[in-house]
Image (tube, rainbow, N blue to C red):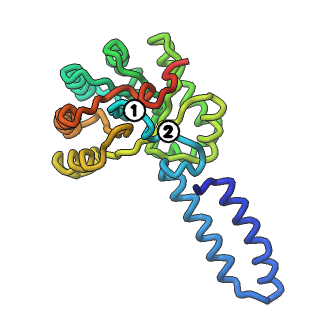
Amino acid sequence: MLRRKRVNTTAVFLLLPLVALCFMEHLPWWPVFALLFLWFSLTVFGSFFIQWNYHLTSKHANKNIETNWVSITFDDGPNPEFTPKALELLAKYNAKATFFCVGQRIEKHPEILKQIISQGHTIGNHTYSHANTFGFLSLDKVLNELVQTKDLVHSLTGKKIKLYRPAFGVTNPQIAKAVDKLKVHSIGWSVRSLDTTSRSEETVLKRITNKVSKGDIILLHDTNEKTIAVLEQLLLFLRKKNLSSVTVDRLLEIEAYA
């Protein structure tokens, strides 16, 4: 598996003799530029594809589980219009989920956060601002984002959250250091619904149902009406397939709270 430290070490090991040979005019410069392009491409793709575990190890599924469990997860809430609808459907079908919440939205809707927990679901950290530039923040700013949300949840619920999902699924060395320092679990996914794109309800649902099986983590967003429509059909599908949605910590056999 490609990991940042291994790729960087290999790139340096190959780059130094190539540069030396170029200066001695034994080689043209294009192999150096090709190597740099390859290194840059791997770093970019490794940052944007959390499943690569390029910068840090995230948990994406539990395919060794014996029970017929999957885990539905929601990002970007709490949302005053759609999170309550998601909670109503989950209760209707006796399903549990994990909500990766944004700190600024928790501040606006603390009652929804408490409702999520009171109904037996778990909460995860999805940064404080969910800024588009999150992947470019310094270590101090990344830590501040995660600590702000952690402290906010603790002040409202008494719980110290240990589950974390990187905003946009983007990772980098600063995020890896923050995860290690705060001793949190980075949670990815194995089934991405793409429910926030322009795809139709039918396409999103089919994308999930064609892939999902025991042990998978499903990524949804409790921020739009399309997801709510997909959620009910998904819950019906899981029931027919004898699959149950449980919280991600239960699926992965880890602690949600310290």
Residue lying at 45% horizontally and 38% vertically, measured from the top left: 64
Which residue is rendered at x = 54% and y = 30% of the image? 146
Q: Position of residue 163 (x, y in %)?
A: 49, 28
Residue 238, image x, y percentages: 23, 35
Find disc 1 in the rendering and name its residue.
Answer: 66
Q: Residues within 10 Å of mark 1 (few under 14, many from 20)?
A: few
Residue type at mark 1?
A: Glu
Mark 1, secondary structure of its residue:
loop
11 to the left or right of 52: right
Image quarter in which the C terminus is found:
top right
Residue 57 left/right relative to 253: right
Question: Which residue is pictured at 35% across the width and 45% down the height?
Answer: 191
Is residue 57 positioned above or below 162 on the image? below
Q: Given this view, does label 2 or label 1 mark the residue nearer the observer? A: 1
Q: Which quadrant would residue 220 be assigned to in this image?
A: top left
**In the foreground, 66 or 95:** 66
Instruction: Answer left or right for 18 relative to 95.
Output: right
Residue 59: image tag? 2
